[in-house]
Image (cartoon, grey):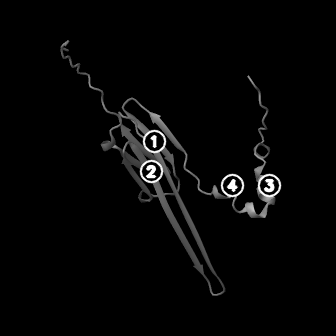
Protein backbone atom coordinates (compact mmCIF):
# COMPACT_ATOMS: atom_id res chain seq x y z
CA UNK A 1 0.00 0.00 0.00
CA UNK A 2 1.30 3.45 -0.78
CA UNK A 3 0.13 6.66 0.75
CA UNK A 4 0.08 9.82 -1.29
CA UNK A 5 -0.25 13.12 0.44
CA UNK A 6 -2.44 15.60 -1.37
CA UNK A 7 -3.64 19.03 -0.51
CA UNK A 8 -7.32 19.52 0.25
CA UNK A 9 -6.98 23.12 -0.81
CA UNK A 10 -8.12 23.16 -4.49
CA UNK A 11 -5.80 25.96 -5.54
CA UNK A 12 -2.73 24.01 -4.45
CA UNK A 13 -4.00 20.67 -5.70
CA UNK A 14 -3.75 21.87 -9.30
CA UNK A 15 -1.16 24.64 -9.69
CA UNK A 16 -1.72 24.86 -13.46
CA UNK A 17 -4.02 27.85 -12.88
CA UNK A 18 -0.99 29.86 -11.75
CA UNK A 19 0.93 29.23 -14.97
CA UNK A 20 -2.23 29.79 -17.02
CA UNK A 21 -2.77 33.15 -15.32
CA UNK A 22 0.73 34.49 -15.86
CA UNK A 23 1.22 33.03 -19.35
CA UNK A 24 -0.66 35.50 -21.57
CA UNK A 25 -0.90 33.09 -24.49
CA UNK A 26 -2.51 30.34 -22.37
CA UNK A 27 -4.66 32.55 -20.13
CA UNK A 28 -7.58 32.91 -22.55
CA UNK A 29 -7.29 29.29 -23.67
CA UNK A 30 -7.50 27.93 -20.14
CA UNK A 31 -9.98 25.19 -19.21
CA UNK A 32 -11.49 27.15 -16.33
CA UNK A 33 -12.60 29.88 -18.74
CA UNK A 34 -14.46 27.30 -20.85
CA UNK A 35 -16.45 25.99 -17.89
CA UNK A 36 -19.17 28.60 -18.24
CA UNK A 37 -21.85 26.03 -19.06
CA UNK A 38 -23.42 24.79 -15.86
CA UNK A 39 -25.31 21.52 -15.88
CA UNK A 40 -28.43 21.33 -13.73
CA UNK A 41 -28.29 19.05 -10.71
CA UNK A 42 -30.01 15.69 -11.21
CA UNK A 43 -31.38 13.04 -8.84
CA UNK A 44 -32.20 9.58 -10.21
CA UNK A 45 -34.44 7.43 -8.02
CA UNK A 46 -35.49 3.84 -8.59
CA UNK A 47 -38.89 3.05 -7.14
CA UNK A 48 -40.88 -0.16 -7.14
CA UNK A 49 -42.85 0.62 -10.31
CA UNK A 50 -40.81 3.37 -11.98
CA UNK A 51 -37.57 5.28 -12.33
CA UNK A 52 -37.78 8.98 -11.52
CA UNK A 53 -35.41 11.71 -12.69
CA UNK A 54 -35.58 15.08 -10.93
CA UNK A 55 -33.70 17.98 -12.50
CA UNK A 56 -33.26 21.37 -10.84
CA UNK A 57 -33.91 24.00 -13.52
CA UNK A 58 -35.28 27.17 -11.90
CA UNK A 59 -36.41 30.11 -14.00
CA UNK A 60 -37.35 28.02 -17.02
CA UNK A 61 -40.65 27.30 -18.72
CA UNK A 62 -42.10 23.98 -19.87
CA UNK A 63 -41.53 25.00 -23.47
CA UNK A 64 -37.78 25.44 -22.85
CA UNK A 65 -37.23 21.67 -22.51
CA UNK A 66 -36.75 19.12 -25.25
CA UNK A 67 -37.00 15.51 -24.09
CA UNK A 68 -36.44 12.58 -26.44
CA UNK A 69 -35.41 8.93 -26.37
CA UNK A 70 -33.64 6.78 -28.92
CA UNK A 71 -31.77 3.46 -28.65
CA UNK A 72 -32.31 3.14 -24.88
CA UNK A 73 -30.98 6.67 -24.28
CA UNK A 74 -33.07 9.46 -22.76
CA UNK A 75 -31.91 12.97 -23.64
CA UNK A 76 -33.03 16.13 -21.86
CA UNK A 77 -31.88 19.40 -23.39
CA UNK A 78 -32.71 23.08 -23.29
CA UNK A 79 -31.76 26.23 -25.13
CA UNK A 80 -32.85 29.58 -23.81
CA UNK A 81 -31.98 32.99 -25.17
CA UNK A 82 -32.89 36.28 -23.52
CA UNK A 83 -32.46 39.74 -24.98
CA UNK A 84 -33.14 42.94 -23.15
CA UNK A 85 -32.87 46.42 -24.56
CA UNK A 86 -33.30 49.69 -22.73
CA UNK A 87 -33.29 53.03 -24.55
CA UNK A 88 -33.20 56.53 -23.19
CA UNK A 89 -32.43 59.81 -24.88
CA UNK A 90 -28.81 59.75 -23.62
CA UNK A 91 -27.97 56.04 -23.71
CA UNK A 92 -28.93 52.61 -24.95
CA UNK A 93 -28.23 49.38 -23.06
CA UNK A 94 -28.48 45.87 -24.52
CA UNK A 95 -28.13 42.65 -22.58
CA UNK A 96 -27.95 39.16 -24.03
CA UNK A 97 -28.04 35.90 -22.17
CA UNK A 98 -27.83 32.44 -23.72
CA UNK A 99 -27.96 29.21 -21.74
CA UNK A 100 -28.06 25.64 -22.94
CA UNK A 101 -27.48 22.16 -21.61
CA UNK A 102 -27.85 18.54 -22.63
CA UNK A 103 -28.04 15.56 -20.28
CA UNK A 104 -28.29 11.96 -21.48
CA UNK A 105 -29.22 8.87 -19.50
CA UNK A 106 -28.91 5.21 -20.47
CA UNK A 107 -32.24 3.50 -19.90
CA UNK A 108 -32.30 -0.01 -18.43
CA UNK A 109 -33.82 -2.92 -20.34
CA UNK A 110 -36.90 -2.98 -18.10
CA UNK A 111 -37.85 0.65 -18.86
CA UNK A 112 -41.06 1.28 -20.78
CA UNK A 113 -39.77 3.89 -23.23
CA UNK A 114 -43.18 4.47 -24.81
CA UNK A 115 -44.71 5.51 -21.44
CA UNK A 116 -42.20 8.20 -20.36
CA UNK A 117 -43.90 11.26 -18.85
CA UNK A 118 -42.53 14.65 -17.74
CA UNK A 119 -43.84 17.36 -15.44
CA UNK A 120 -42.31 20.76 -14.62
CA UNK A 121 -43.30 22.65 -11.49
CA UNK A 122 -41.58 25.05 -9.07
CA UNK A 123 -38.22 24.86 -10.86
CA UNK A 124 -38.07 21.04 -10.82
CA UNK A 125 -38.43 18.91 -13.94
CA UNK A 126 -39.67 15.42 -13.04
CA UNK A 127 -39.42 12.63 -15.59
CA UNK A 128 -41.02 9.30 -14.73
CA UNK A 129 -40.08 6.14 -16.59
CA UNK A 130 -42.36 3.19 -15.77
CA UNK A 131 -40.86 -0.27 -15.38
CA UNK A 132 -42.03 -3.28 -17.34
CA UNK A 133 -43.96 -5.69 -15.18
CA UNK A 134 -42.14 -9.00 -15.13
CA UNK A 135 -44.19 -11.88 -16.40
CA UNK A 136 -45.40 -14.13 -13.59
CA UNK A 137 -46.41 -16.92 -15.94
CA UNK A 138 -44.13 -19.88 -15.97
CA UNK A 139 -43.64 -21.41 -19.33
CA UNK A 140 -42.82 -25.07 -19.27
CA UNK A 141 -41.76 -26.91 -22.34
CA UNK A 142 -40.35 -30.38 -22.57
CA UNK A 143 -36.88 -30.55 -24.01
CA UNK A 144 -36.12 -33.43 -26.30
CA UNK A 145 -32.79 -35.14 -25.88
CA UNK A 146 -31.17 -36.04 -29.20
Q: Nearer the viewer, residue 88 or 118?
A: 118
Q: Which mark is residue 53?
A: 1
Residue in the image at 47% along x and 35% along y = 45
Tag 4 residue: 32
Earlier residue among tags 3 and 4: 3
Evaluate if marks 1 and 2 touch, with contact meaning CB atoms under 8 Å apart. Answer: yes
**For the residue labelled by badge 1, is the local secondary structure a helix, a strand or a loop?**
strand
Q: Residue reaching furthest top?
A: 145
Earlier residue among tags 1 and 3: 3
Q: How far, Cα to Cα, is label 3 from label 2?
A: 37 Å
Looking at the image, is 129 positioned above or below residue 27?
above
Earlier residue among tags 4 and 1: 4
- Quarter occupied by residue 22: bottom right
Q: Which quarter of the rendering shows the N terminus?
A: top right
Q: Nearer the viewer, mark 4 or mark 1?
A: 4
Q: Position of residue 104 (x, y in %)?
A: 46, 47
Q: Position of residue 69 (x, y in %)?
A: 37, 48
Residue in the image at 76% along x and 56% along y = 20
Q: Nearer the viewer, mark 1 or mark 3?
A: 3
Tag 3 residue: 19
Q: Which quarter of the rendering shows the C terminus?
A: top left
Q: Residues within 10 Å of mark 2 (few under 14, many from 20)?
A: some
Q: Residues within 10 Å of mark 3 (few under 14, many from 20)?
A: few
Q: How far, Cα to Cα, is label 2 from label 4?
A: 25 Å
Amino acid sequence: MSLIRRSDWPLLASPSWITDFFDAERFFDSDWLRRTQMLPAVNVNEKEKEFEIEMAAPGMKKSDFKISHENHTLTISSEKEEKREEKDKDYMRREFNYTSFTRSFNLPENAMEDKIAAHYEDGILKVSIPKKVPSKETISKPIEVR
